[in-house]
């Protein structure tokens, strides 16, 4: 048995009038993430953590933002494909822990739905997936509501 740990980090800029997708769900807000895909920064960080754990590169290598195939794509599809690669290599998720940095809106009411959504896309128990959120107390690009950042950590067992 072998354990592998991975970390992922992603940032997207926010712009008025775009849909805001976080953790696989649509959140009511006046701004959304600027992106080639649906801009789900939480899923992107999680994918990078899963890929990083097995030294498989990053999300940009597997799903290039220059490809028309991924234009506007639902990031849940990227997560499903990423976790399939993990399983193909004989590994499974022990747990994932994601920290979302955004100033607004309050996402506490959505956290459990995000966890359930991410767990269901990967086909794992919801208890294996943690999502936490914090503001930056108004500091920096997150605090100025210019962008959203996510840190993700995963442990895999093979
Ligand atoms: Mg991204």
Image (cartoon, helix red, strand yellow):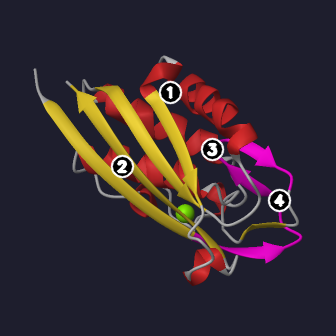
Helix, strand or loop status at disc 3: loop
10 Å crowding of disc 2: few (<14), some (14-19), many (20+): many
Mark with earlier residue (4, 2): 4
* Residue 144 showing in the rendered view: yes
Secondary-structure class at tag 2: helix
Q: Is residue 11 magenta?
A: no
Q: Quadrant of residue 121?
A: top right
* Magenta span: 12-28
Which disc is residue 19 wearing?
Answer: 4
Which of the marked residues, 1 or 3, is nearer the chain's N terminus? 3
78 on left or right of 68: left
SS of the residue under disc 4 = loop
What residue is drawn where x is 57% and y is 51%? 133
For disc 2, the marked residue is: 49
Considering depth in this image, is 55 or 140 the residue closer to the camera?
140
Q: Residue 134: x, y in percent?
A: 57, 57
Instruction: From the top left corner, tell me how far across and down residue 72 is, in percent.
Output: 73, 58
Tell me which residue sits at (27%, 47%) in the image.
6
**Residue that label 1 marks:** 122
The residue identified by callout 3 is 23
| Vertical relation: 78 (above or below) 64 | above
Q: CA distance from mark 4 to mark 2?
A: 24 Å
Question: Split into 4 quadrants, where in the image is the C terminus?
Answer: top left
Marks 3 and 4, how far apart in space?
Answer: 13 Å
Crowdedness of circle 3 by 10 Å Cα count: few (<14), some, many (20+)? Answer: many
Compared across the picture, whether 56 is left or right of 43 comes to left
Compare marks 2 and 1 and give the one earlier in the sequence.
2
Which residue is found at the position 58% from the left and 64% from the top?
67
């Amino acid at each position: 048995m072998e354990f592998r740990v991975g970390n992922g980090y992603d940032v997207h800029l926010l712009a008025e009038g775009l849909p805001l997708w976080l953790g696989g769900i649509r959140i009511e807000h006046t701004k959304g993430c600027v992106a080639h895909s649906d801009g789900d920064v939480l899923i992107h960080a999680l994918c990078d953590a899963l890929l990083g754990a097995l030294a498989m590169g990053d999300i940009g290598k597997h799903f290039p933002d220059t490809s028309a195939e991924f234009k506007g794509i639902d990031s849940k599809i990227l997560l499903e494909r990423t976790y399939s690669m993990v399983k193909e290599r004989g590994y499974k998720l022990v747990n994932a822990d994601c920290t979302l940095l955004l100033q607004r809106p309050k996402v506490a009411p959505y956290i459990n739905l995000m966890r359930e959504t991410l767990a269901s896309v990967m086909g794992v128990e919801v208890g294996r997936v943690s999502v936490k959120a914090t503001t930056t107390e108004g500091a920096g690009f997150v605090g100025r509501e210019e962008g959203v950042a996510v840190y993700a950590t995963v442990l895999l067992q093979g």
